[in-house]
Image (cartoon, rainbow, N blue to C red):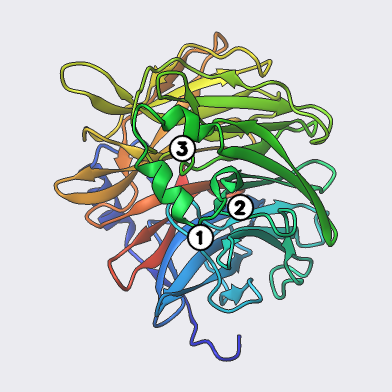
């Protein structure tokens, strides 16, 4: 794009022998393919972070934020070979520097396949900074070469802070979005200050404040959308999750604030294309009481039979509280299996979990955690038996020897693609294909 110095993707090749030796040191369960190539995406001269990824067959779209001088833009890069190589990034937002992004509020990207001979339709969702923060979406109907003018999802004049979005296409090609919204706390405050107050809330007022924090929903149709509130009492700065089943059923999850400042995961279902949602249910009673927002939310994936698989972080109470990741599933959207702990690399606080499954129903969970004073990304294969009992392989690092944060996943026709942020001030986005054994 004119006016931007853009660095295209680069690949770093390793020999198969070197790859085998390197991965053997981390107890490999997942294997990289083709052999260990790592694609790097970046806008030159900027810090690149907060990626999200979506795939349909060999078509892959990666969205992320690129920042310089306190200004951030949303970019998308496209791969047509399942993530082995990528084209040049294209800017999505029309207002330069407006994006407000972070690890728990990345830009979201989703694909709506339109037939084998036509590229998928692409939708991107992000939060923009203005007098009040806004939730925007833009579409590409030409394979990511250009994006249409953005559509604002919340109602005109809605005050206060909002974000922590999630996005999904249903089987009819309708884009659905959810986000966290603090307009209930916005009276007389500048955008963003309600968020800060919520994070500093005390045990006495935390539940009352949360009742003014809402989960909102909108379906983006053409150049218009109609928003509405789905729930109050949300934990304000943890990411949300949204997925569509094969029959178009919508599933949403978020961190909720229950009595006693308990921060557990809530879940709801829409079986009529978003026109109505069932009353929220509690996924697991984890009893994690915290006087503020942990900045760490759930992730969900839906298999071909409509079973919903959910992962989330929490803290196990005791003399020495310990952070952990858990997995559960539901077939009916109302009752969940007993939570199963996910094996990690052994740090006291694994964070930011993601989950994805391929067409064969094989699943991978990814996350990051602090190991030897360095944040690293890891993944593990998840298997679920006919009795709904979960088992796991051994956790492995996605980028052995390097810093990696906030990994995200998407299934391609060449394997599971993992994408993450690496580096410091001059950070870049990296991607590699994982192949299940």
Seen at 58% across and 67% down, the residue is: 131
Near-viewer residue (435 or 336) = 336
| Foreground disc of the pair 2, 1 | 1
The image quarter containing residue 396 is top left
Tell me the residue at 37%/37% (across/down).
Answer: 201
Distance of label 1 from label 3 (alpha carbons): 25 Å
Q: Which residue is mark 2?
A: 54
**Which is nearer the N-term, disc 3 or disc 2?**
2
Q: Residue furthest bottom?
A: 3
- Circle nearer the N terminus (1, 3): 1
* Quadrant containing the N terminus in the rendered view: bottom right
The C terminus appears in which quarter of the rendering? top left
Q: Dot 2: few (<14), some (14–19), or many (≥20) neighbours within 10 Å?
A: many
Q: Residues within 10 Å of mark 1 (few under 14, many from 20)?
A: few
Q: Is residue 332 left or right of residue 98?
A: right
Q: Name the secondary structure under disc 3.
A: loop
User: Which residue is identified by label 3?
Assistant: 297
Residue 225 % position (x, y) = 81, 53
Numbered label tally: 3
Q: Is residue 385 left or right of residue 218?
A: left
Q: Residue at x 46, y 77 (%)?
A: 43
> Contact, CB < 8 Å: mark 2 with mark 1?
no
Residue located beneath label 1 in the image: 190
Residue for point 29% across, 65% down:
423
């Amino acid at each position: 794009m004119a006016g931007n110095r853009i660095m295209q993707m680069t690949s770093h090749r390793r020999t198969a022998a070197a790859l085998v030796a390197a991965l053997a040191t981390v107890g490999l369960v997942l294997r990289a393919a083709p052999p260990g190539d790592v694609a790097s995406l970046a806008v030159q001269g900027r810090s690149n972070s907060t990626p999200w990824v979506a795939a349909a067959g060999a078509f892959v779209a990666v969205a992320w934020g690129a920042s310089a001088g306190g200004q951030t833009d949303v970019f998308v890069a496209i791969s047509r070979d399942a993530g082995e190589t990528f084209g040049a990034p294209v800017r999505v937002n029309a207002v330069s520097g407006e994006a407000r992004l972070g690890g728990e509020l990345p830009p979201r990207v989703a694909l709506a396949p339109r037939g084998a001979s036509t590229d998928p339709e692409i939708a991107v969702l992000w939060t923009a900074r203005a007098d009040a923060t806004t939730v925007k979406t833009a579409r590409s109907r030409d394979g990511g070469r250009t994006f249409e003018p953005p559509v604002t999802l919340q109602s005109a004049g809605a005050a206060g802070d909002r974000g922590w979005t999630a996005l999904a296409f249903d089987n009819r090609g309708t884009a659905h979005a959810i986000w966290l919204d603090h307009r209930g706390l916005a009276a007389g405050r500048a955008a963003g200050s309600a968020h800060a107050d919520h994070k500093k809330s005390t045990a006495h007022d935390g539940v009352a404040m949360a009742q003014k924090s809402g989960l909102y929903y909108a379906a983006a149709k053409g150049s218009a959308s109609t928003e509405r509130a789905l729930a109050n009492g949300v934990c304000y700065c943890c990411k949300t999750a949204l997925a569509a089943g094969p029959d178009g059923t919508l599933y949403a999850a978020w961190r909720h604030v229950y009595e006693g400042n308990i921060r557990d995961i809530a879940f709801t279902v829409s079986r009529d294309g978003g026109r109505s949602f069932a009353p929220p249910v509690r996924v697991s009673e984890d009893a994690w009481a915290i006087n503020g927002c942990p900045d760490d939310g759930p992730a969900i994936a839906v298999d071909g039979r409509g079973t919903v698989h959910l992962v989330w972080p929490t803290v196990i109470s005791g003399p020495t509280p310990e952070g952990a990741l858990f997995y559960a599933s539901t077939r009916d959207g109302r009752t969940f299996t007993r939570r199963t702990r996910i094996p990690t690399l052994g740090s006291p606080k694994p964070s930011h979990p993601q989950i994805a499954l391929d067409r064969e129903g094989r699943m991978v969970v990814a996350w990051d955690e602090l190991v030897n004073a360095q944040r690293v990304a890891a993944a593990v294969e998840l298997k679920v038996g006919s009795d709904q009992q979960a088992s796991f392989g051994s956790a492995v690092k996605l980028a052995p020897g390097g810093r990696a944060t906030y990994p995200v996943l998407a299934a391609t026709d060449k394997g599971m693609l993992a994408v993450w942020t690496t580096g410091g001030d001059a950070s870049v986005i990296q991607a590699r294909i994982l192949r299940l054994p």
